[in-house]
Amino acid sequence: MVRFRPATAALGALAGLILIVTGCTTPSAPAAGPAKPAASTGPASPDSPVDATATAPVASQTPVVPTAPVTPPEPVVPAAPVTPVIPVAPPTPAPLPKPTPPPVVVAKPATIIGSEESSTMFDNFTAYITASDGQRVSAGRVGWNTALALSAGAHRLTVAFVRGVFSAQTVVQLQARSERAYELKFATDAQVFGKSSYCEFWIVDSATGETVLAPTRVPLTKIETGK
């Protein structure tokens, strides 16, 4: 009996190997689990037991894209009727009154006369105007006291002096003022015992006696008389 123990052991090992190979090639049956309850077509009874093993339905794998909310169109408000604008002509301005022209003031002229001193023994001493602004005065010596009109403003006067055979003449400037009366004055040494060398001319305002033209001295000349 002792001889057959090794053979028995070898047979046992061979049988185990066959079982192992057979188990690898033969599919194993799924394990039996609890039976699924049949689907009910009606509402579950409140008394029916709830199967805790029932699985929830599997959600769809397609992602859900949220849709943008649709804004309802704004209500159309009818436009108000347009009233045509009628142009209105501006009012015609009243004519402006014509400005009253300033009164024309006519400056009255001034006047000037000469002067004379009488002499009982010899000729008189006479100063007079011979020309005004280059225009000869016709009155001459005899008209020494005839008033000569002068417009307001500057004037060039030619003045003269005569006594016997002695005379003098010069030109003076006078700024005449409206309505003033002037007088030509003189001073000389043409005396009986004088040197008869000069004559001075100046002009005064007859109303006030004010000297309006300073004295101007000129030499005396002797008038040549024919033989």
Image (cartoon, grey):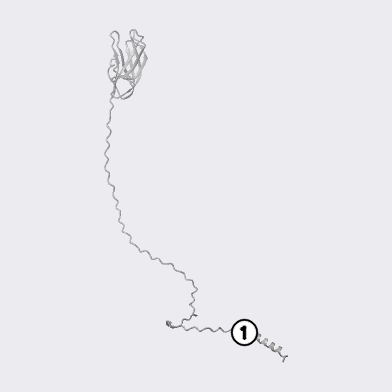
Figure check: 159 above or below 64: above
Comparing 32 with 143, the one in front is: 32
Figure check: 67 above or below 223: below
Is residue 83 rendered to the left or right of residue 43?
Answer: left
Q: Residue 164 lies in what quarter of the image? A: top left
Q: Residue lying at the far right in this picture: please name it.
A: 3
Q: Residue 25 lies in what quarter of the image? A: bottom right
Comparing 108 with 141, the one in front is: 108
Quarter of the image containing the N terminus?
bottom right
Q: Residue lying at the far front in this picture: please name it.
A: 2
Figure check: 202 above or below 2: above
Determine crowd level at label 1: few under 14, some 14-19, many 20+ residues with C-alpha closer than 10 A: few
The residue tagged 1 is 23
Is residue 36 rendered to the left or right of residue 226?
Answer: right
**What percent of the width, then of the height, locates residue 152?**
31, 25
Secondary structure beneath label 1: helix
The three-letter amino acid code for the residue at tag 1 is Gly
